[in-house]
Amino acid sequence: MQIADLLSPERVQILPEISSKKKLLEHLAGLLARDLDFPARTLYESLYQREQQGNTSLGNGVAIPHGKLPDAPENIPLAGTLVRLQQPLDFDAPDHQPVDIVLAIVVPESACKQQQSALQQLAEYLQNPKLVDAIRSAQDTATLYDLLASWAPEDQPLD
């Protein structure tokens, strides 16, 4: 699996400013709702509830909020959205660093194993300094999406 397998060009953004983690999660849920046949409110609640259970920051300014969708049909795919924040946001990260790269993913509740595997691989990708630096250097959303679509580090196996 590659990061781009979860994304569409419309779900990759560079945001100039967002005022809070709650507003960010609402925005991410709205982006996901565009392509999934699922209400944005339900997507938000899933992301928010998971964030309340424990912080999803990986450190180094990166977070992977994720949620499970109860009662979702199994045909809803693992889906994600990635935003880079121009103004980093306090995310209560263990390293106390504000977050500027956020990859949110959601899956049907019945696909827990798939989610865990994806989270592990995505965390490995987003701890790669070359990828993180490239994401931070992208000047626009088209460049950012193209970067993610082509990212396949030699030392990372692809499923």
Image (cartoon, rainbow, N blue to C red):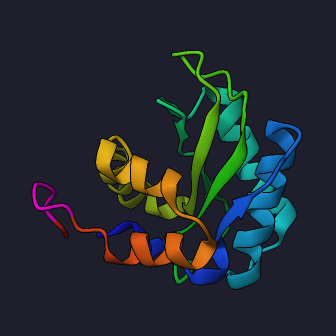
Residue 149 versus residue 65 in the image, above or below = below
Q: Residue at x 18, y 68 (%)?
A: 158
Say above or below: 60 vs 71.
above
121 vs 75: above or below:
above
Q: Nearer the viewer, residue 123 or 43?
A: 123
User: Is residue 124 in sight in this rendering?
Assistant: no
Q: Residue at x 67, y 35 (%)?
A: 51
Q: In the rendered view of the protein, which quadrant contains the C terminus? A: bottom left
Q: Main secondary structure of the magenta part?
A: loop
Where residue 122 appears, as percent x and y from the top left, is: 37, 53
- Residue 70 rendering spot, x and y as whole percentages: 67, 60
Residue under the image location 47 percent in, 30 percent down: 60
Q: Position of residue 26 (x, y in %)?
A: 83, 54
Q: Is residue 23 magenta?
A: no
Point out residue 147 in the picture as x, y percentages from the top left corner: 41, 71
Q: Is residue 113 left or right of residue 135?
A: left
Quarter assignment of residue 81: bottom right
* In the foreground, 67 or 109: 67
Query: Viewed as shown, does residue 58 lie left or right of 10?
Result: left
Is residue 51 visible in the rendered image? The answer is yes
Q: Quadrant of the N terminus?
A: bottom left
- In the rendered structure, the answer to whether residue 25 lies left or right of residue 147 reads right
Q: Bounds of the magenta span? A: 153-157
